[in-house]
Every structure is written in C-alpha cells, then in structure tokens.
Amino acid sequence: MNTLPLILAALCVFAIGYRYYSAFVTAKVLVLDDRRRTPAHVHEDGHNYVPSPKWVLFGHHFAAIAGAGPLVGPTLAAQFGFAPGLLWILLGAVLAGCVHDLVVLVASVRHDGRSLADIARTEVGPFAGLVAMFAVLLILLVTLAGLGIVVVNALANSPWGVFTIGCTIPIALFMGLYMFKSSPGRIRVAVPSAVGVVLLLAAVVGGRLFAQGGAAGTLTFSAHQITVLMAVYGFVASVLPVWLLLEPRDYLSTYVKLGTIAALVIGVLLVHPDIRFPAVTSFVAGGGPIIKGKLFPFLFVTIACGAISGFHSLVGSGTTPKMLDKETDARFIGYGAMMAESLVAVLALIAACSLFPGDYFAINVPPEAYAKLGYHVVNLDQFSAEVGEQLAGRTGGAVSLAVGMAQIFRGIPGMQALMGYWYHYAIMFEALFILTTIDTGTRVARYVLQELLGRVEPRFARSAWLPGNLTTTAVVVLAWGYLIYTGNISTLWPLFGTGNQLLATIALAVGTTFLVNMGKARYAWVTAVPMLFVGATTLTAGVEGIATIFWPLTRKPATAFQGYLDSALMTLFVAGVVLVLVNAAVRCVRTARGEAPPHEAFGPPTSAEGVPLRCC
C-alpha cells in the first residue's frame, strides 16, 4: 500500500478535529474567557510566572510534551501491522489525547497554575489529592526514566549528537537573555529566533565535522556517562529561572522538531514510499519478538504518546499554565500541540513500516532471536554500508526509525548519496526531541515534590525558597537517574508506557470531576468516555505486565531486585488509580444529585461582574 493516501487522510482528520471538535470543547464545555486573568499575570514574578507570546509558549509546550513516546512507541508497535497503530493514533488523539491536554491546562489555569494533584484535592477531595500526589510523583519519575533511557541509547558513543545537543545550551542562554532582558518591558522574538536557528544549523553541521575530526573522542561517552551528564543538566535546568534556559531552549528545539516534521511530511508526499508491512500481522495474538503480549491491551500502552499521554497533564499543570497569556490561547497550545505530536507519531509509524519486515526485525530483535523468526534481510546490509555502522541488533526503536526516515529523505531527488548524513541527523533529531522533555519533566516533578513536602514543612511549598528548590531537584534527579543507570529499554519502556497511561486515567478522572463541579455534567462525556477506555486497557496491561514481564524477573538472582521493584511500582500505580477513580465517581454523583461542590472547587464560570457565562 502506498503511503500518500495515509498521510493525506491523517492530515484531514487532524484538520477536522481541530476546526470543529476543539471549537466545541472550548466554547461549549470550557467556556474560555479572555477577561479572566491568568496566573501568569496575577503572580508575575519573572521566574516561574511569565506571560509569554502564544507561539513562544507553543514552542515550549510542544518541546516539553513531545518526547520518546511519539517516536519510539509507534515504531515498536509496527510489530502488530500498520492499521491498529494508525487507527489508535488518529482516533485516540482527536477524541482523547487532545481533549485531555486541553482540559487539564484550563483546569490548572483556573486553579492558579497548580499541579494536577492539587486540582484533585480541590475538585475531588483531600484523600484523592493525597493519593494522586503520590501516584503522580512515582509515575513521573518512571516516565522520566523511560524517556531518558532512549536519550542514553541514542547519544552513547555519538560525538556528533553530543556536540550538537551541547551547543543548544549556550545558544538557548543567549536567546533567553536577548528575548527577555535586552528590552525592559518588552519580549523580543524575531531577532533571537533567527540568530538561534542559524547557530543551531551551524551546530548540526559542525557536529558532523567534529565527529570526523581527531577530537571526537573527547565527546564520546558511554551510556553510564551520558546518564550522569543528563542528570547534571536536568538539575541545573530545573533550578534556573524558566526564561533563561528552559523556555528559550524548548522554543529553539521546536524549530528543529517542526522543521524536520514538515520536511518529513513533504518527503512522504514527494517520495510516497510503499508500506511494506501488512495491515495486521500474526503477532496480534501475542508472542511477538518485540512486544510479548497481545494487541489488546499492549498496543495502547506501547504507543504511550501520540494518542494520549498522562505526562502531558504534568506539563499542562506545571510550567505551561504559569506562562499562559490569556485563556483562549489554551486551545492552540493544549489541543494544537498534542495534535502536532500525533502527526509525529503517524510519521514515525510510516517510516518504520516503509522498511521491509525482515530489515525492521533484524534491527529491533537480538540476532539470536531474529534467527528463529524465519525472516531475511533485504536492504539492511546496504544501509549499514552507507551509514558506516552495524545496524543489526540495535534494539529500542530509535535506530530503525532513523533508518526509515533516512530512507525517505534519500528518495528525494538529489539526496540519494546522503543516506549516512540523514541517518545521523535523524539520530540527533530523536535525541533532541526527547531531551527537551527531561528538563521540563524534572521541573514539574520538583513542583509536585515541593507541594508534597510543603504539608510537612511550609517553606517547601514556596517556589522562591532556594534551599527547597535545590533539595527537591536533587531528590528527583537522583531517583530517575538511578532507574536509568540500572535499567534497560526492555524493562523501563513497559513500566513507563503503562504508568504513563494510568496517569492519563487519573487526569481524565480529575478533568471529569472538574467539569461536573463546573455545572457542565451534560458535557462530561468528552472526558469520561476516554477515561473509561484508557482506564480499562491500561489497568488490564498493568496486571498482565506484572504477571508476564516484571514478576518473572524475580526468579533470577541477577534481576530479582529489579523484578521486585518494578512489580511493587506497578502495583502502587494500579492501586492509586483505582482509589482516585472511586473517589472521583463518588464526588461526581454527589454533585450531580445537588450537593454543593467542595468550597475550593472552581465551580460554574462567571465573568468579572459575577454574571454566569453562557455560550452562543
């Protein structure tokens, strides 16, 4: 099957979803009102609360949410064939993922920029808030580890990637100072953006030249060394003012991300390669070489982003609501950024499925296991020669995605001799794509931990208290750094995928309660239906994951501790989600029967004059 009708159909679905469904949700359900001041203006401090231009904040938000999930998840899920993953990405994003992101962002903005756990406390109840806070923190730490392990695998022994990624830090510092401090009272965007893009392109080209030079060894690091360097970066990025490094770096990264995505869309339209995979493979019944479980429920946790992602709820209730200039910007940033990520997932699936199955499995399966599958390589030896690296057995999804992307770019007229260049560029693109999520995620985890510790020591709840910032950041970084240092993709990705979708279930439950308490019970189905579907699939995956993936590790002395740890974490995830769901259901029923919502709940939206708002 040719990819051209697939990409055109996907673009049409996204256009219709944004034009009509997002308009319905923002107007009828959420009733966005620019007269209501956002936390960025109410608490403006130049550090965490900074009113930001819509496009700048879109860049930060998109860079923060678009991590490993939309790239690696669809690539691994190609094992089941192209049809199941494509349908889940398109329908899941438009009807569930984008709505999830938008509702959480608006709920946080209307709760003074507070975290998802704090919104659960005010909308559902104190017990649900406490459970959600612990669940969010644990799931977030595992999520950061799951994303980080992909960065480690991509940058290990890659001086080009390390050079280019490293250069983005001083470039972002320059942009932050220029954008926010060069003209007092004014945010400058055009000049620093143009200069930043030029410098970034120079860093990409310079990275290849550096990697070919004699000094390449100075930036050639092992996986453990990359883990330590990434932890140091995550610590520094989380404690610096958001405008100095985090926001400009994510904004800069978005140019690379969106530019590459646009180029890949154009490449697919020009080259329109054939899909080499069947619509459905025999592995839908289980027993696959990459994902051991059946299509249901493991497809829905393997594609952990691109369709719906709980991690987005932490960004949407973390840094982004503290920088939103006006309420109506939430539609473009919340719904639109998730839709852009979904497009990335579609492109990743197309790139992976454009490989012959023999080549795809040869990359993603260890050689000894591949020999038992009965497949034969077609173009892999030629690709390895052109790239200059051995590609067989490079598991984890990142390498096969890079090969698929490079193959598409090579098909553009005049690009046939540049397979090696495009492959290494794609590896750099993936690493940059993912790493921008780590810095934002670390800051969000710091916020959650500060709120939790603030119940014991009130000073921790103050974001301006430096000792609290340093202490909580160190704890967060050490936690996800340890999981990366001692784990691998085969154990961390299932834990990340399931935990991530369980977090989405919590966020949808809180969002549903927020709508019911707001007097919008008749529209609560926009979050309740996705919550029921995602909850059912993910709770099933969690239970099956313990039985088939994590608990078997306890039978071997070398992996026993990891098996007990992963099984305990998954058990806590499942228990926490069930408790939040039960409490949310009770709260919704009580409100629907006429009981007043909790006194701290947002309640029905009103204008500045106290008059209830109605939609036309």
Image (tube, rainbow, N blue to C red):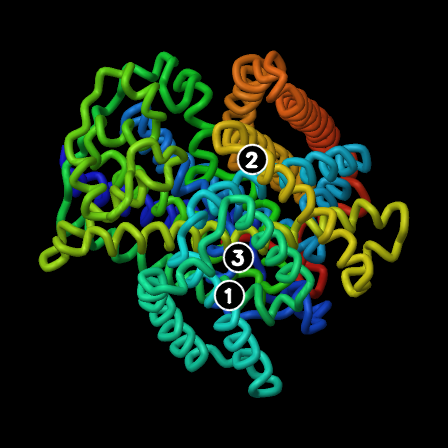
Tell which circle, 2 or 3, labels the residue nearer the N-terminal end: 3
Q: Position of residue 150 (x, y in %)?
A: 47, 42
**Mark 2: secondary structure:** helix
The residue nearer to you, when weighing 603 against 180, is 180
Tell which circle, 1 or 2, labels the residue nearer the N-terminal end: 1
Instruction: Write down the residue under mark 3.
Output: 330
Q: Position of residue 399 (x, y in %)?
A: 34, 41
Instruction: Write down the residue under mark 2.
Output: 500
Q: Position of residue 56 (x, y in %)?
A: 49, 67
The correct choice, above or below, for 299 with respect to 418 in the image is above
Q: Which residue is at a point 53% across and 28% down the rendered structure image?
A: 491
Asked if marks 2 and 3 touch (Cβ < 8 Å), the reply is no
- Answer with the quarter of the image where residue 298 lies: top left
- Kindly report which numbered mark, 1 or 2, lies closer to the viewer in this rendering: 1
- Kindly report which numbered mark, 2 or 3, lies closer to the viewer in this rendering: 2
**Mark 1: secondary structure:** helix
Three-letter amino acid code at the position of disc 1: Arg
Asked if marks 1 and 2 touch (Cβ < 8 Å), the reply is no
- Kindly report which numbered mark, 1 or 3, lies closer to the viewer in this rendering: 1
Q: Which mark is residue 249?
A: 1
